[in-house]
Image (spheres, rainbow, N blue to C red):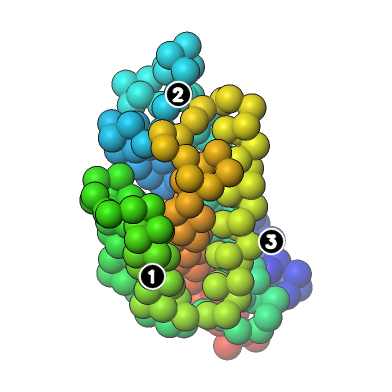
């Protein structure tokens, strides 16, 4: 949020409007990616939903895209706020071309988890872990980004385990406590991706702050 309290003289209406716009855009991106990536998982029979909850042309439970959109908005807003609190605005590869490459790599990692055949799950998990860390190193490299990515990935994995345990949906061939062992890697890559999008969107507010500072 490039936190509202950090500059008392800054226009409150600008910050509020900017926050709502960024949240809406992050939510939309999260919903879109959820629809596309979940379609891929369902088509490859990696995830299975009960027949009575299939309610869209994307063969997905109705609640999956809104949940992913909400999580994406929260992550995308949290990353720049943490950067601001730490006093370290993230400036590594801050351009839209880099962000789009990050999204493409994230989609590629998901594609690999669903379509690439490996000898065993351990090999697949290690490969996806290396790719996810490589994504962080290529497009982020911040300690705060890595820490948030790991923390949120673990929490998301725990939430998924609870959903599977309560038979909301299931994974084919689970190999780690009802789920697939590579799932935390996917969550980590997704967090880094949404964090990068959120940081890029927050640059407009950061530039506004800089201009206000120079004017004052």
The residue depicted at 35 percent of the width and 61 percent of the height is: 123
Of the numbered discs in the image, which one, if any, rests on residue 12?
Answer: 3
The residue depicted at 37 percent of the width and 36 percent of the height is: 46
Name the front one of labels 3 and 1: 1
The correct choice, above or below, for 190 with respect to 98 in the image is above
Foreground pick, 181 / 108: 181
Q: Secondary structure at mark 2?
A: loop
Q: Residues within 10 Å of mark 3 (few under 14, many from 20)?
A: few
Single out the residue that lies furthest toward the top.
52
Expressed as whole percent of the image width and height from the top left, the position of residue 80 reads 58, 69
Residue 212: name its quadrant.
bottom right
Q: Residues within 10 Å of mark 1 (few under 14, many from 20)?
A: few
Q: Earlier in the sequence, mark 3 or mark 2?
A: 3
The residue depicted at 24 percent of the width and 50 percent of the height is: 117
CB contact under 8 Å: marks 3 and 1: no
The correct choice, above or below, for 203 with respect to 45 in the image is below
Residue 130: name its quadrant.
bottom left
Q: Earlier in the sequence, mark 3 or mark 1?
A: 3
Rounded to the nearest angstrom, the CA distance separating label 3 from label 2 is: 44 Å
Residue 132: name its quadrant.
bottom left
Foreground pick, 115 / 142: 115
Rounded to the nearest angstrom, the CA distance separating label 2 from label 1 is: 29 Å
Q: Quadrant of the N terminus?
A: bottom right
Residue on which the image places disc 1 = 130
Residue on which the image places disc 2 = 49
Rounded to the nearest angstrom, the CA distance separating label 3 from label 1 is: 42 Å
Tell whether 87 sits left or right of 40.
right
The answer to whether residue 183 is seen in the rendering is: yes
């Amino acid at each position: 949020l490039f936190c509202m309290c950090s500059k008392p003289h800054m226009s409150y209406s600008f910050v509020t409007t900017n926050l709502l716009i960024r949240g809406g855009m992050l939510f939309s991106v999260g919903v879109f990616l959820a629809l596309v990536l979940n379609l891929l998982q369902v088509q490859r029979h990696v995830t299975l939903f009960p027949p009575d909850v299939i309610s869209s042309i994307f063969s997905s439970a109705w609640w999956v895209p809104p949940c992913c959109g909400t999580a994406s908005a929260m992550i995308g807003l949290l990353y720049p706020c943490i950067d601001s609190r730490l006093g370290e605005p993230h400036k590594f590869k801050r351009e839209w071309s880099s962000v789009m490459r990050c999204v493409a790599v994230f989609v590629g990692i998901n594609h690999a988890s669903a379509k690439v055949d490996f000898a065993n799950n351990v090999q697949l998990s290690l490969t996806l872990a290396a790719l996810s860390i490589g994504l962080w190193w290529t497009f982020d490299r911040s300690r705060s980004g890595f820490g948030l990515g790991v923390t949120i990935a673990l929490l998301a994995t725990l939430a998924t385990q609870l959903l599977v345990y309560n038979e909301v949906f299931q994974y084919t061939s689970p190999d780690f406590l009802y789920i697939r062992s590579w799932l935390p890697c996917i969550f980590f890559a997704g967090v880094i991706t949404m964090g990068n999008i959120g940081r890029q969107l927050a640059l407009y507010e950061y530039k506004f702050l800089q201009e206000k500072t120079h004017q004052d």
